[in-house]
Amino acid sequence: MSEDSRSQRIRYRRFSIFRSLLLVLMFCAAAFFVIVFLNGRKSSTYALDQPYDLHVQNGAEDISEFSQQTAIGFAADLVAAEEEVPQELTLAQDTCKMLLFNLETKDPVYAHRIYQKIYPASLAKIMTAILAIENAGMNATVTMTEADFDLEEGAQTSSLMVGDTVTMDELFHLLVIYSSNDAAMAIARSIAGSTEQFVDMMNNRAREMGMTGTHFTNPTGLHEEDMYTTAYDVYLMLRQAYSYQDYLNVSQMAEYTTDVIGSNGSTRTIYHTSTDQYLTNDQTLPSGIRILASKTGTTDQAGSCLALVIQNEYGVAYTAIVMGALNKPNLYSNMTTLLNLANT
C-alpha cells in the first residue's frame, strides 16, 4: 500500500471517529433537553391531590404563562366559583350547603358554603352509578347474597331477597330511583370483587374528576366518620353522570316495576317509587322547570340532600344542589328557591 493511501485511510478513520463522537454528543444533548422539558411540564401541571385553587383557575398574574394555560385547560369546561356567591334569597334554612350553576354560560348564579366538607349520604351513589355505567354490562346477571344486606339497622333496602337473580340494569334502576343500599352493595361486589376494591375505584375516579374535597369509604353513602364531600365536588360528580344517557333516563323516572327470579325459580314483581319528591309530585316544581338528572340522600348526620340537573323554561341547563337540610320541608323549600332563580 502506498504512503498516500495509508494517509488517506488514517484521515478517513479519524473523521469517522470524530463524526461518531459528534453524533453521540448531539444525541445526549437532545435527550437532556427532553428530560428537562418533560420535568418542567410535570412540575407545572395542576395536581389533583392539591386543594382546588380558584385563583389559579382564573389565571393569577404571579404564576407562569405555562401554568396558567395548564390550569385553564383543566377547568375549561367547569364552573369556577368562590365559596360564597350571594343573592337576595329567603331561605328556610341558611346553614345548608347550596349552589346553582348555569351549565351553558359556566357562571355561578348562587353559592353558599360550597367548599365546606359534609357527609354525602346517598349522593355517594352517584359515583356508584357512574362506575356501573363505565364498568358493568347491564345485561349481566347478579345473584343477591347475604353480604349485600349486611347494612346498619334502618338502612333503606329494596324488595329483593337473598338468592334473587337480577340483571345489572335492574340493580342500576333500584340504585338511582329508590336509592337501594342492597343494590349498591351488589353492584360494588359484582364489578370489583369486593366493596373494598370498589371503594378504591370510587376514590380513584373522584381524583380523576378533580374532586379534591371528597373521600369515599363505602358504595352506599351510609354514614362513616371519614367519608365526606363538598357541594362543589357533588357538582363535579353529577356533571359526569349527566354526560351519560343511561343515568338521565333512569334518574327521571318516578317509579319502577320489574320481575325478579327468586331462589326457588319462581318469578315475582317488585315496585318502587322515586325518593325525589318532585318526581312523585309530592313537591311542586316551579313553572317551566324540568328535571334532567336527580339524586337524593338522607342520613341523620348528613341531613337531607338533593342534587339536580334541570332545564329552565328557556331551555338552559343548570345544576342545583342543596345539602345538610334539617328535614325534607327545608330541603325542598330551599331547592325551590334556587330553581326559581333559574327562570329569572
Image: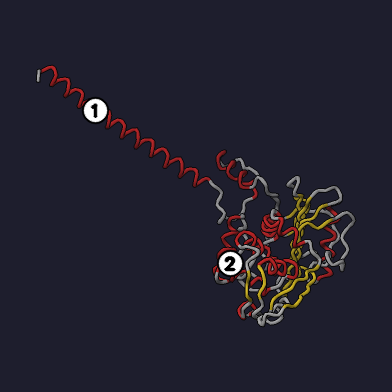
For mark 2, does the 10 Å Cα neighbourhood hold few (<14), some (14 to 19), or many (20 or more) residues?
some
Q: In the picture shown, does residue 195 fall above or below 242? A: below
Q: Which residue is mark 1?
A: 16
Tell me if residue 98 can be seen.
no
* Residue 42 horizontal side relative to residue 95, left or right: left
Q: Amino acid at mark 1?
A: Ser
Q: Which residue is mark 2?
A: 191
Q: Nearer the viewer, mark 2 or mark 1?
A: 2
Q: Secondary structure under badge 1?
A: helix
Residue 247 location in percent, x, y?
Answer: 71, 59
Q: What is the residue that sits farthest to the right in this orientation?
A: 287
Residue 293, by quadrant, is bottom right
The N terminus, quarter of image: top left
For mark 1, does the 10 Å Cα neighbourhood hold few (<14), some (14 to 19), or many (20 or more) residues?
few
Residue 220 location in percent, x, y?
Answer: 66, 71
Q: Decide which of tag 2 and tag 1 comes sooner along the chain.
A: 1
